[in-house]
Image (cartoon, rainbow, N blue to C red):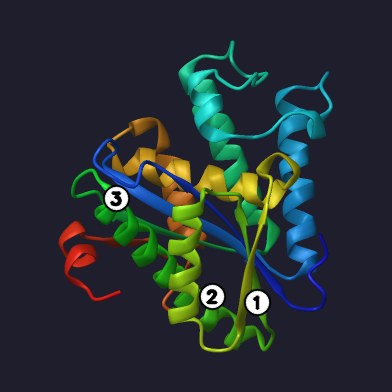
Amino acid sequence: MRDAGGLAAYLDESGTRGGADGHFVLACVAGDEGSIARLAGGLRGVKLGLVPGADPDAWEFHAREIMHGGGGTPLRRRDGRERAAAIRMAVSAVCASGAAPAAVAVRNAGPGRPWASRATRRASSILVARLERLAAARGMPCRVVSDSVRGGHRRDMERALLRAARGRVTGIEYVDSRASAPVQAADALAYAVGRHMAGDARFGEAFAEVERCAWLNGGWGGVRVVEASLAARKRL
């Protein structure tokens, strides 16, 4: 998928939009055509290194499946630390690519559709505002590309984009994550942040790397964490 002279921001999420997980995390990787191509090549190299005998395009780098051994991942026989190290490798590929990663973690307040909708819209609004700043700094438009999501979740994301966009973020489209290396990389970022926020020590180094190279408030360094009370009170 070509970026047509502008920026493309690839999104994915981790955690439930309710009370089952401690945080709902929305992450993205944004860049021009060159940095996105380097990212895709870097993730391909990670996959080749992990499973030398397998076609890297034949399996999806899906963090939750890697950690839990589901979805036919070829890493299912690795132990937990090896799986966590694989996700760290994907995070390193993002940071080495020259693309701009970003992540927003919303602390879950409770289950149910109203909370889930607020969490999605709040996280999406923050990311879109950040992408507007990045696009302004780079002097080019930015389109958003998300993993394909269900109808209600999709409407929440699109509503947030419409409200937060200021002219440089031009729209959103959806792709199958199995065919998109940048979306798979965003998934790795989101998962690493979520597991670190949940207290999983295996992801401390990966989180530190995300925090170091993330784009926050118009500059580099930092992951935005939103309290549940703020997500619930703020008019979206």
For residue 98, which quarter of the picture? bottom right
- Figure check: 95 above or below 141: above
- Residue type pointed to by label 3: Arg
- Residue type pointed to by label 1: Cys
| Disc 2, SS | helix
Q: Residue 149: where, in percent of width, then height?
A: 54, 49
Indicate which label's residue lies in the foreground, 1 or 3: 3
| Disc 1, SS | strand
The residue pinned by badge 3 equals 113
Residue 131, numbered circle: 2
- Camera-side residue of 128 and 117: 117
The residue pinned by badge 1 equals 142
Q: Residue 153: where, in percent of width, then height?
A: 45, 54
Locate residue 98 relative to residue 107 in the image: left or right.
right
Picture residue at 17% right of the left edge, 69% below the top: 233
Picture residue at 34% right of the left edge, 47% below the top: 17
Number of numbered discs overlaid on the protein picture: 3
